[in-house]
Amino acid sequence: MSIDELADAVGISNATANRFARALGFDGYPQFRAELVSGFETMLAPIEGLRSEISIASSSSEVINRSLSDDISNLEATRREYRLDLYDRAVKMILEAENIYIVGYGASAYLGGIMCHALTNYCNNVQANIGTGGPAQVARALYKFTERDLVIAISFPRYSSDVVTLAGQAKRRGVPILALTDRPGSPIANISDLTLYTPTKPQFNSEGIVLCLIEAICAAVAHQSESPVDIAAETTELMLPWLHHGKK
């Protein structure tokens, strides 16, 4: 709200609204308002993005094309910011960990489940919080983790406070944290030992972008693991009874 709108809604004068802002340590109401809004930017961004998208007269095909273009732009941005040393360190952290716990909530929980599935063949013990009894259950599991283990935290707008809390608890116990997030200002970036970034769409989060990053990391882990071909062959042999391979 502007100062006029606030004064009218609350039933006070503009001068009183300004005095209130100054009493809180701001120069005036505009500075107070700007600070208040900044804390809600990532939370409200999808809503504002949807409002902006709807305001543009578009056919379904145009919306789809624009969405795909956004995805391509974000993938290109991720590749431009690619740093070989960071990704090498991330793969090393994964391969050297005795136990791995992947934490994510909302859509990130499903992405964590996919990452868990992809890493299972190449790592000793990988778990993801999808399907667990909630943050308290994850905290109980992480209580046993040490500096020899690894927590992979997946957090994108809107950031889940549960991911931040669990990662913070693990960090205080000396457990290494690998974060996947969208920008240095992300709350999980300040907690992690290593952070890999990929931008998301301006209107909506793109789980496809994050999935591409996860698939790239898992491909590198598979490539750098011991005997990846033997592992793949043995896994396929074990799965044969459940794979469709034509009519008998």
Image (tube, rainbow, N blue to C red):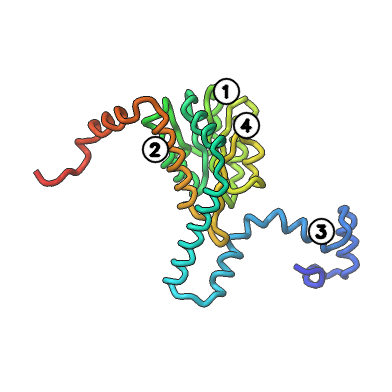
Q: Could you say where residue 100 lies in the image, as x and y percent from the top left?
A: 48, 30
Position of residue 135 relative to residue 234, above or below, is: below
Q: Could you say where residue 221 lies in the image, as x and y percent from the top left?
A: 43, 33
131 and 149: which is toward the camera: 149
Residue 208 visible to the viewer: yes
Counting residues from the start of the chain, the first of labels 2 and 3 encountered is 3
Q: Quadrant of the N terminus?
A: bottom right
Under mark 2, the amino acid is Ala
Q: Disc 2 vs disc 4: which is toward the camera?
A: 2
Secondary structure beneath dot 2 equals helix
Q: Disc 3 vs disc 1: which is toward the camera?
A: 1
134 and 176: which is toward the camera: 176
Q: Is the residue marked by circle 1 packed among few (<14), some (14-19), or many (20+) residues within 10 Å?
A: some
Counting residues from the start of the chain, the first of labels 2 and 4 encountered is 2
Which residue corresponds to the image point at 81% horizontal and 68% vertical from the top-left?
3
Which residue corresponds to the image point at 46% horizontal and 61% vertical from the top-left?
68
Asked whether the residues under the numbered discs 2 and 4 touch, taking CB atoms below 8 Å apart as contact, a structural biologist would say no
Kindly identify which residue carries mark 2: 118
Distance between mark 1 and mark 4 Cα atoms: 13 Å
Distance between mark 2 and mark 4 Cα atoms: 26 Å
Q: Which mark is residue 32?
A: 3
Counting residues from the start of the chain, the first of labels 1 and 2 encountered is 2
